[in-house]
Amino acid sequence: MPSVIVKPHALKALRRRHPWVFSGGIAEVKGRPLAGETVDILAASGQFIGRGAYSPQSQIRVRIWTFDPAEDINPSFFKKQLQRAVDFRRKQANGAYFKACRMVNAESDGLPGLIIDRYANFLVCQFLSAGTEYWKSAIVNTMQLLLPGLGIFERSDSEVREKEGFSKITGTLSGQAPPNLIKIGENDYYFWVDVRQGHKTGFYLDQRDSRTCIAEFARGTNVLNCFAYTGGFAVAALRAGAKSVTNIDSSEPALELAKRNATLNQLDTDKMQNIVGNVFVLLRRFRDVNRKFDLIILDPPKFAESSRKLDRAARGYKDINLLAIKMLKPGGILVTFSCSGALSRELFQKIVAGAAVDAGRDVQVIRWLSQPSDHPTRLNFPEGNYLKGIVGMVR
Ligand code: SAH
């Protein structure tokens, strides 16, 4: 088997079982591994460190499958990992979300680069690394056995894939092709999911718990839902008795689907206003006409792609949080998120605190929000813990 000798400075993270070897941490590559092929990772002394998938074009040169020298990487390995991931979701919450959940969460489920989301009778997959591309057919065959009868659709059209040297690809891998919209049930709601054109695999399953939380605070409120996408939070708020919800998103098709999602849940669409536009611009316009809200949700896309872009991202987060805090009535609720893995909880708190100071308001944190249990994270892979949210009461 080809092997990779790592430099001493890279050993520390690997000994703590962090599953990535960066290109700068490699002293020597022995043999000529192909993209996705399995390599042994060795210390200069020859000591075994781990076994992973080689990715010649990526900065993340090896993603580790196992730290166990006795474990071979073959279809049985994938069967074991996938079975474990599916069993966990089946049991979790008595299976409450088993029909619409993240079935496989990449590194955090021991399968670097692999995302599999379930939407009713379909699985939507992203093969985002050289290793998952290499083992694609073993993965698809196993999923057919574990969850028989489901259509399997590929949405490997993320930018991450290009960094691995693969082109974007989408299409049906097995079984029935999905319809344009799939109806899913979540908690007490239903949503239409566009698995072909929607963001990521179609829906923000990672905000399930946050939707429940928002319902708690929404009764009788006028809500401003920034970065609304297909109206997940809007549906939760209206169902909980919000007086009105104003959705802002730059994507017109997303907001059209938000309307349809309100109708699907038999909610009064007159209470929902949709504005297609840029949140940064519209918040300023609202400020200028002194518009106030009782509840403001900020759920922006990832502003920090990597730690190098943190400064710029921090300015973006501060800007929208400052504007939102000023626009809340006394006692109003701010629900603010960051889904940048590169931005820590501590830094996010500091940014929001800075925004509150500049706004001249005091914010009392009522709750911290995070990913739901179908998006588990590993202690030794903090990057997987990307989603953080603060529910704060603005005084
Ligand atoms: N809150 C949503 C998910 C938000 S994802 C949910 O729970 O489902 C981020 C959204 O922000 C996307 O729908 C994207 O279209 C939108 N977006 C990105 N940049 C934007 C901007 N500058 N102004 C308005 N919307 C933006």
Image: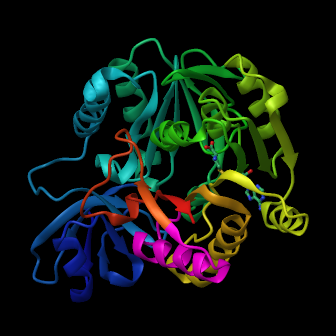
Whether residue 321 sits left or right of residue 63 in the image: it is right
Q: Is residue 33 magenta?
A: no
Q: Nearer the viewer, residue 51 or 314?
A: 314
Residue 381, given in percent of the width and then of the height, sits at 31, 63
Q: Nearer the viewer, residue 162 or 318?
A: 318
Q: Nearer the viewer, residue 8 or 318?
A: 318
Residue 244, given in percent of the width and then of the height, sits at 76, 37
Task: Answer above or below: position of 287 versus 45.
Answer: above
Q: Which residues are magenta?
A: 339-363
Residue 172, given in percent of the width and then of the height, sits at 61, 26
Residue 166, given in percent of the width and then of the height, sits at 59, 55
Image point (34%, 48%), residue name: 111
Q: Which quadrant holds the C terminus?
A: bottom right
Whether residue 197 sits left or right of residue 382 in the image: it is right
Task: Answer above or below: position of 289 versus 250.
Answer: below
Task: Answer above or below: position of 206 versus 145.
Answer: below
Q: Which quadrant holds the N terminus?
A: bottom left
